[in-house]
Amino acid sequence: MAGNAKLLHETLWDQDPELMDLIRKEKTRQIRGLEMIASENFTSLSVLQCLSSCLHNKYSEGLPGQRYYGGNEFIDQIELLAQKRALEAYRLSPEEWGCNVQPYSGSPANFAVYTALIEPHGRIMGLDLPDGGHLTHGFMTQTKKISATSIFFESMPYKVDPVTGLIDYDKMEETARLFKPKVIIAGISCYSRCLDYKRFREIANQNGAYLFADMAHISGLVAAGVIPSPFEYADVVSTTTHKTLRGPRAGVIFFRKGVRTVKANGEKVMYDLESRINQAVFPGLQGGPHNHAIAGIATCMLQAQSPEFRAYQEQVIKNARALCAGLLEKGYSVATGGTDVHLVLVDLRPVAITGARAEYILEEISIACNKNTVPGDKSALNPSGIRLGTPALTTRGLLEKDMQQVVEFIDRGLRLSKEIANVSGPKLSDFKRILHEDSTFSEKVNNLRKEVEQYSEQFLLPGYADF
Ligand SMILES: *Cc1c(COP(=O)(O)O)cnc(C)c1O
């Protein structure tokens, strides 16, 4: 092949070996490592096929039946299918709920929700980031408004009890009475317990606020019906589709339709969320929808209705519980004392290991996780815990008994980090240097990494064989 034809028709590996080599290396990393980042998962072959399909080529601004471009006959059908299956996956009636499947991801979805519901500087209230909330729930510090949701809206956090690690609902109620938010957000990125949506609803009602559930982390568990659903109480629900739901990297917003409240005189007040949310997504914040991702949503929402998917989500929780039990048995502490979901927040203060050191040593032995603040942490910059999740490992087929081996590897890694820290002193840079320069330590780390990698390699990964 030559000329333009070569550019167009040659495979990636023939045309761009430099990039292909990096993709293959990443694939090898995914196969060899134990992926325990709680927000990650390995999506299915069918979702990957949607993502690299011809749908990527099409512009389709607008909604099905009301597009700004021609040629959308099949794109319309695909988007309608994605919407229908999204409602089915959460057992929602199309009379009471609608959805928008165009958000590019979770953060844009949330920004669209605020844009739809409130004016600039409208008040929002979400779980504080260091307590397990998400940036997009209004995070700011003393000196800086970090998330755009705190730049364009006024945010007031609610928090967990520093001792129990549980959300302090009474305090939230009291703060909400003073702050009078227009939106209360029920959603987590690092909290291992189910949310009390009924209580959230009561507090929202006391303030005439919308209840917005951001189920990004738990949407797979909710679809499978293995934890309580926010839909019974929320006005609006957003989700990412690539975490526990195991679909493409994208977002969905669900909104209520029909009667919102009935006044004392019997007059019905209707929801007007459908047009507000649809317009906030496009033309408010986005342009052309990612049709390849929307197809991925359609197929993942079909999978989410299957008995196999339910069994997978049950196993995700069983594995998280086994992981938690194993860590407790080894003498580690866990925030809130346990887990009801797919993640465990390990509090490393009692064993005097910093979150940063733990994350680093585990990465060195091919276990991926992230450092995280734990309830009562003094500094958000130097967090004292790590967040561990089971969705990705469960996709690879690991069961409770395998969690025992995983706990063993984590414990050996963490104990090694203590040995190294005893020599290196408190600075992280010294810790990293000694780990690599001291031959006894580096050999121990290398041996442990080999063991972890040999172990991981036996478990299958969905997707293409080598990229
Ligand atoms: C991951 C997450 C998001 C953001 O999703 P992105 O796709 O990373 O933008 C929003 N809310 C919560 C609760 C999340 O966990």
Image (tube, rainbow, N blue to C red):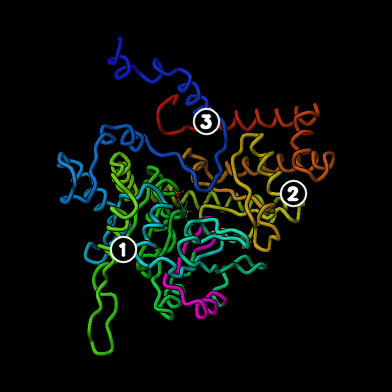
Q: Secondary structure at mark 2?
A: loop
* Residue where numbered disc 3 is placed: 31
Where is residue 362 drawn, in percent x and y?
Answer: 66, 39
Q: How many marks?
A: 3
Q: What crowding class fits label 2: few (fewer than 14 Cα within 10 Å), some (14-19), or many (20 or more)?
A: some
* Residue where numbered disc 1 is placed: 255
Residue kind at label 1, given as amino acid type:
Phe
On whether residue 174 falls in the magenta region, the answer is: yes
**56 or 224, which lies in front?**
56
Q: What crowding class fits label 1: few (fewer than 14 Cα within 10 Å), some (14-19), or many (20 or more)?
A: many
Query: Would you place residue 268 above or below residue 232 in this image?
Result: below
Q: Quadrant of the N terminus?
A: top left
Q: Quadrant of the C terminus?
A: top left
Residue kind at label 3, given as amino acid type:
Ile
Judge from the rendering whether residue 279 lies leftward or rightward of residue 197; answer left or right: left
Residue kind at label 2, given as amino acid type:
Ile
**453 or 254, which lies in front?**
254
N-term-proximal mark, 3 vs 2:
3
| Mark 3 beta carbon near ligand 1 (under 8 Å) | no
| Mark 2 beta carbon near ligand 1 (under 8 Å) | no
Is residue 192 at least partly visible in the picture? no
As drawn, the label of residue 353 is 2
Where is residue 421 drawn, in percent x and y?
Answer: 80, 42
Q: Are marks 3 and 1 in contact (CB under 8 Å)?
A: no
Start-end of magenta stretch:
171-194
